Image: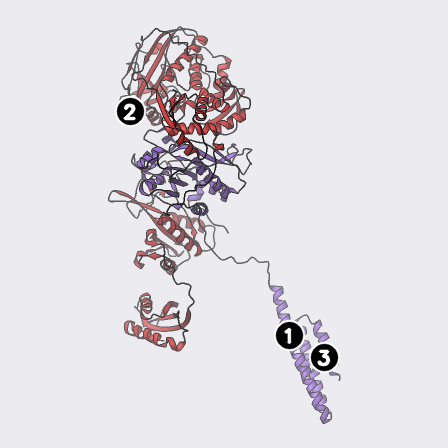
Amino acid sequence: MKVPINWLRDYIQFDDEQALVNGLTAIGHLQDGPAKKVAGTRVYDLEIRQNRPDCLSVIGIAREAAAILNSKINNPVDSSAALPSVKDKTKITIQEPNLCYRFNSVTIGGLKIGSSPAWLVQKLAAYGIKSINNLVDITNFVMVELGQPLHAFDLKKIAGNSLIIRLAKSGEKLTVLGNKKLSLDKQDLVITDGDKVVALAGVIGAGESAVSQKTTAIILEAATYNHASVRRSSRAHEIRTEASTRLEKFLHPHLTQLALQRAVELILLLCGGKVIDHTDSYPKPAAQVSVIFSIKRLNLLAGGVLFSPSGAQSILNKLELPSARLGEDQIKVAIPYFRTDLTQEVDIIEEVLRIWGYDKIPSHLPKQPAPKNIDSQSARMAEQVGSLLVAAGYDEQITDPLTFETAPKLDPIKLENSLNADKTMLRTSLKYNLLNALKWQQKFRKEQIKLFEIGKVYYKEDNNYKEKTMLGLIADSTSYFDIKGLFALLQERFETKLKDSDLKIETVDVNDKIYFAEIEMDKFKETRIIRPSYQPAHLLLQDLSLYVPKNARVGELITDIYQASKLIQKVVLGEEPRIQHGQKTVFLNLQFSSLRTNLTKEGVEPEKAKIILLLQKKYKAQIR
Amino acid sequence: MDIDQTSKSFHSKLSQIKTSDQLEKLKISYLGRNGQINSFLRLLKDLPQEEKRTFGDKINNLKKEIENAIGQKTITLAQNKTKQDFDTSLPGKKPHVGHFHPTTQMIFRINAFFRYLGYSVYEGPEIETDEYNFAKLNLPQDHPARDLQDTLYIKEPQILLRTHTSSVETRALTNERLPIRIVVPGKSYRNETSNATNNSIFYQYEGLVVDQGISMAHLKGTLIEFVKWLYGPRTKTRFRCKYYPQVEPGAGLDVECTFCWGKGCSVCKYRGYIEVLGAGMVHPNELKACNIDPAKWSGFAFGLGLDRLVMLHFGIEDIRKLYDGSLTFVD
């Protein structure tokens, strides 16, 4: 909301402008950017809360200012000046009382449309609205002043003295101000004259029936609609107007009456003319809202501040919220028409606290004992697995799950309304993004690139939408066995039900030696027991050099060695097996260890013999 | 024929030696076939028997002394030579270590603070339902505040990508026992055309406490402690009223802009302060929607956007660069 300071001063007196704006920021209307000088006054842009349409008006801001300054506003609407009693000559039919709560109108004749006086032009210019003519300017002025949009139709362009508020027919046409042609749908609420559509209700009027220099008589209306209906139409036709911005929020129907009174006063003053008729269709008048709140509850939420009932009431007074005590603890607040946001106890509590001052609320940590830890396993594992990979020299990537995959691994989930053509589905694998990242880095990094990502993949399964967290690894200038070794390290470090067969290592590029692997993160569990990787062990190393048949599986042979001797701590492949004289050479370092005794070469001899015997039998191994 | 004199003159010559060539010449002149030592030995045969022995010993000692000294000098010369060739100004060789993504680093940093205060790190799904992402958060259909959320739909209106991590609040409040104290770092999604400051994916960090007797003072205390921990103990803060449908009273915590110290600059959009946190007391409607009695329990919630924080901290100017795989560690 743009607040021209000179305009604000019409309703409230204050000295220090910046102090006031700081105060408005503190109570919920953030100053957005520095003041700008427009049309001879400084204009502040305030960020208005979604539930405060009353503050989309200068009078609303003045009320907030009055609460800060503890003073009163000058109300511009003379509430004693009733609208003329000539009544109900216009026929107004609300066909959708659930979408249009009140349709209030006056008919004025004998008008002289011309240019506006300088004060009006300047006020609108400061707010950011261009002057059109005196009549249109008045409707805009009253909207910005009071927050209620108004619309004037040229009476000559309205067939008969009749307005019907109904839902549009599918495909019905409307050409609006600015010559934009709309094709309406069945959910659009429209105003018609029985003949043609004259406005998209709450959003914009037809160009044809707009007020022009030739206009001499008008129907001026102020209405309250279902906010959701206005928002839907405004979105559907991509038209946001000053009117729709206000009417798509909760406005009170009472405001229509005040707005018409004010507008009529100004029209008679600036355009001349005479009120011919006042027709008000208000099928179900709004009930008076009142809210009861508890002082105890207020003090509990305030955390150590002790409001007395009268103390709280005096704050409510500053906000023009009349209140009355109900016994010891409770206070009943009558909610005025301009505060549609106040509907329950906590709303009133916030009012008291924000005007009293958030800066005065005490500040301390909760003294309640910390509850039971409920860390998500997934979060803990991501930290621990990630740390191990970082230690192994891998750089983490976080990439956008919104993507486009040409060959998804799983049944992909598509998005219905993505604005970006390259982000129409959710990834089914971490591969594509990681490979892209690697290729990008290859352009300017000479050293080896090793990347990982711990992130989700998404897929459809039996018509359910699923997501699961994966670990993706990619590296160049590497080998199958480097990736497999990293995997072995993870297996060693964490509890896992993962089998070797779960690891699918993909050769992405043979020349660049790029390998990729993807593992489900929920296969890893935190280790509860500290593994004996650091021990006060007595170690003894022995080499074992063998020939085995060409087709022997060396990995299985190594697994068997672990099984064969309890003293074996570790078996390391000394060099890559080679084929020699039609046989495979295997060079192993055996690491024997014992927690109890000093191992000697002679001591491990029987163990080594046991191993050799097994290998001779099972693998037809020969000692080299 | 003075052995002592010879020794003295050898050492004085040796001390002048600068190169191994010179040393080699010196060595030959003393130990060579026609060198000093041999010329002494040649004199031996003419000496009487008893002098032969003492003089012979002296010559042998001198020979050993010279050999040792030359040996020593050889080593010193070699070392000097290496020293001259060894350029210590060359850069050292850093071991290669991996890195966490900047956002992860920030999450770990913040987690550390909240873990210390007894919070659990909690996660929830990214594919969400309208119920958990909106309805239970006091954001019913047609609520004006839904306008702020440009939702990415998988199946409109029920299945969507969560627009904030607040959806995990309602998950936790529905599924976990009270009291509860959690933080939720995670991805969120908005349907936006990507540019330098907006991206369809972004990171939020959410916090939630529900217990008996939780007040605004606890919220304020927690947030101010947190911000001082993150930005430094002298950080100036501003705690003001702010609207979020899922909390009431609602609050915002701003930090004085560290680029202009409150004067107003492009970083803080000329506000002097940077909005860091949105927060407030959990709305009774949210508690009720999660089957919690607001008369018995109260709580606070807060949320912050991580990306801006990460970008300021790491000097990254385009949010898209955070998550498009182009971040390269350049150390």
* Chain label for disc 3: B
Report whether A243 appears left or right of B2.
left
**Foreground residue, A485 or B237?**
B237
Q: Which amino acid does label 2 sit on?
A: Gln
Are dots 1 and 2 on a single chain? no
Secondary structure under the numbered disc 2 in the rendered image: loop
Give the label on residue B72, or none. Answer: 1
Label 3 packing within 10 angstroms: few (<14), some (14-19), many (20+): some
Give the label on residue A187, or none. Answer: 2
Q: Colour in which chain B is shown? A: purple
Q: What residue type is labelled 3?
A: Ser
Query: Which x, y percent locates residue A226?
Result: 32, 23
Q: Is residue A262 at all visible to an observer of this figure?
A: yes
Q: Colour in which chain A is shown? A: red
Query: Which x, y percent locates residue A67?
Result: 47, 23
Distance of mark 3 from mark 2, alpha carbons? 118 Å
